[in-house]
């Protein structure tokens, strides 16, 4: 083998080595680096979002502590609705009110708490109805009368008909 052939073989070997490195860099290393940078950017965005959620959680911390300290038990909407309906029925029968209608309305999910609703229609004497209304409007229990419709009973003017909607604010298990 002559020196010219040796130089050509070395030149071709070096050229092949450079081309092989370029192809390996372009096909193996560079996509991995881009993928890692993309994942890093996504992770940094998620971290920023998580930090903002934590900051927002600190902003709502007093409200959360108040809810927990005031006895708000974690419950399901169905259980809270049935308990609310049972309470309204018990209070109405204790005051000799005639229950005309009792319906559970769809609950409304919220960002920090859910609201369960019950519709009740009763008739009775005015003082008994007002006593019932004051007993079921319990703000400290996060329960309030949100709709109220009063009108005299058509066949007996000494009695009144009441249609109310009562809402209760609850914390569901998935929000804790």
Image (tube, grey):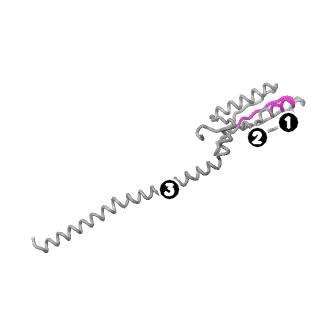
How many numbered marks have been drawn onto this rendered protein structure? 3
Magenta-highlighted residues: 117-133
The numbered dot on residue 33 is: none
Query: Label 3 neighbourhood size at 10 Å, few (<14), some (14-19), many (20+)?
Result: few
Q: Circle 1 sits in a helix, a strand or a loop, which is it?
A: strand
Query: Label 1 neighbourhood size at 10 Å, few (<14), some (14-19), many (20+)?
Result: few
**Residue 145 appears left or right of 156:** left
Q: Does the segment drawn in magenta span residue 126?
A: yes
Does label 2 or label 1 sit earlier along the sequence?
2
Q: Quadrant of the C terminus?
A: top right
Pointer 2: what residue? Answer: 146
Query: For the point 60% across and 51% down, which residue is it?
Result: 55
Q: Circle 2 sits in a helix, a strand or a loop, which is it?
A: strand
Specify the quadrant of the image occupied by residue 76: top right
Query: For the point 68% across and 30% down, which residue is it?
Result: 82
Query: For the point 32% across and 62% down, which residue is it?
Result: 25
**Residue 31 appears left or right of 101:** left
**x, y (%) of residue 157?**
90, 31
Disc 2 and disc 1 in contact, CB within 8 angstroms: no
- Of badges 1 and 3, the one in the foreground is 3
Q: Quadrant of the N terminus?
A: bottom left
Q: Circle 3 sits in a helix, a strand or a loop, which is it?
A: helix
């Amino acid at each position: 083998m002559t020196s010219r052939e040796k130089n050509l073989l070395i030149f071709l070997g070096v050229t092949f080595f450079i081309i092989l490195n370029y192809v390996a860099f372009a096909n193996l290393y560079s996509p991995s680096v881009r993928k890692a940078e993309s994942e890093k950017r996504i992770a940094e965005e998620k971290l920023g979002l998580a930090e903002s959620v934590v900051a927002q959680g600190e902003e709502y911390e007093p409200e959360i502590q108040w809810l927990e300290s005031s006895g708000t038990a974690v419950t399901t909407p169905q259980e809270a609705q049935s308990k609310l309906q049972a309470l309204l029925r018990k209070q109405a029968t204790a005051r000799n009110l005639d229950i005309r209608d009792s319906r559970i309305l769809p609950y409304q999910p919220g960002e920090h708490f859910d609201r369960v609703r019950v519709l009740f229609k009763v008739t009775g004497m005015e003082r008994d109805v007002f006593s019932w209304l004051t007993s079921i409007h319990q703000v400290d229990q996060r329960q309030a009368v949100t709709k109220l419709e009063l009108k005299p009973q058509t066949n007996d003017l000494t009695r009144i008909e009441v249609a109310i909607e009562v809402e209760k604010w609850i914390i569901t298990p998935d929000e804790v």
